Amino acid sequence: MTTNAEMTERRVAAIPTGLSRHLDVFIDRAENAELWDIEGNRYIDFASGIAVTNTGHRHPKVLAAVREQLDQVTHTSFQTTPYANYVQVCERLNRLVPGDFPKKTYLVSTGAEAIENAVKIARAATGRSAFIAFAGAFHGRTLMATTLTGKTVPYKHGFGPMVPDVFHVPFPNAYHGVTVDQSLAALDVLFKTDLHPSRVAGIVVEPVQGEGGFNPAPAEFLQALRRICDEHGILLIVDEIQTGFARTGQMFAIEHAGIAADLMTLAKGLGGGFPIAAVTGRLDVMEKIPAAGVGGTFAGSPLSCAAALAVLDVIEEEGLVARAAQIGERLTETLRGWQRSNAFACVGDVRSLGSMVAMELSHDRDPKRPWPELTKLLTQKAAQHGLVLLSCGTYGNVIRVLAPLTIPDEILNEGIAALERALREALDELA
């Protein structure tokens, strides 16, 4: 039997160290919210492949749709010889994405690719060049997506120069003392000192920052951005790559704020484990794309489209929007109980939107004393207790929970218990 240690040695020899290593375990099989490595060890999955398997690993309906598609066609490239399920996915997204106006969609392969294309569309539609994003944002690892990302290490350092005409302003974060008013005031200062709004093609925002620390954007902040964009002819580009497809207790996170985007980028949970992404936008904006200005050889592959249609059916049929809210309530209640406990003075903040739940770890709950060492150790201890857990945050001190929305209650509770044991052991080790 090949061991995890042997495969780690082979990985180190074959793959650049720049591709991060979170856990030195190699997964052999998966089912719903559980994983098994090549040595037979079982893990509860609180990562979902970074918010991809909202419908669980290997959902039977998704697998059946892909198997059926395998017997028909696997690739032609849609822009040369099209196929029906690409059109069907776009039709579904046009209906689902918020906004009481006509929309159009086209498909790409990854979230970063969706961001790159949204930028191209915004420039073509407005005739403007500049973009505004936010501190702590993460939009991907391709060059424009990296430029929009609001964190230097590990995403920007060593890869410069970045794309010009991209500006960042603070993102609201109550725990760190950044209010909505302060963020909007910084945007106003930017307009007055460095960037006239008439040059801005788009404001790019995550309704909940992902890599930035699971920071939900207050509804009034998103509503204010919508008004500012309308006032100045700027396109509001909403990145729902991690937040979409029932994850936050709504189909899309901006529904909590009651607004619509001009352009929305989608990926991750849409494919249920198969690579697919999309840009959905206002018809009048999307029709400004120059002829043959977008596309991709593998974009919207027949297999991924079949998976996406099944994923959308599962979300509806199994009530996963409501289930996400239930999971979030269970997790948030537990973590806030820890936050109030003297035993867990390291839990400085707990925040959530639906089942996107995070706890920020700091010394004595002090936001100015982040504790990334505890955070990293906790993820390792959790794995030893059979739990896959991810960290995030500008200071690397936030634990995020992204359980599949199909996780049974007994496995969710087992994962929470493993998390508590791991946290106690990590604190003891660092005491």
Image: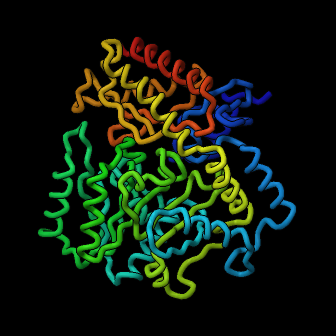
**Residue 427 in the image, given as x and y percentages of width and height:** 39, 16
Query: Is residue 157 in view?
Result: no
In the foreground, 148 or 173 = 173
- Say which residue appears at 70% left-offset and 66% top-offset: 301
Among the 4 quarters of the image, the one containing residue 43: top right
What colour scheme does the image use?
rainbow
Query: Is residue 338 in view?
Result: yes
**Residue 407 in the image, given as x and y percentages of width and height:** 62, 33
Q: Give the side of residue 154 with respect to residue 307, left or right.
A: left
When the figure is inspected, residue 171 is found, relative to residue 78, above or below; the finding is above
Quadrant containing the C terminus in the rendered view: top left
**Residue 347 in the image, given as x and y percentages of width and height:** 33, 24
The mark tally for this picture is 0
Q: Give the side of residue 221 with respect to residue 90, left or right.
A: left
- Say which residue appears at 51% left-offset and 33% top-offset: 327
When the figure is inspected, residue 405 is found, relative to residue 314, above or below; the finding is above
When the figure is inspected, residue 200 is found, relative to residue 1, above or below; the finding is below
Quadrant containing the N terminus in the rendered view: top right
When the figure is inspected, residue 162 is found, relative to residue 6, above or below; the finding is below
**Residue 204 in the image, given as x and y percentages of width and height:** 36, 63
- Say which residue appears at 51% left-offset and 25% top-offset: 380
In the foreground, 187 or 105 = 105
Residue lying furthest bottom? 291
- Say which residue appears at 35% left-offset and 81% top-offset: 126
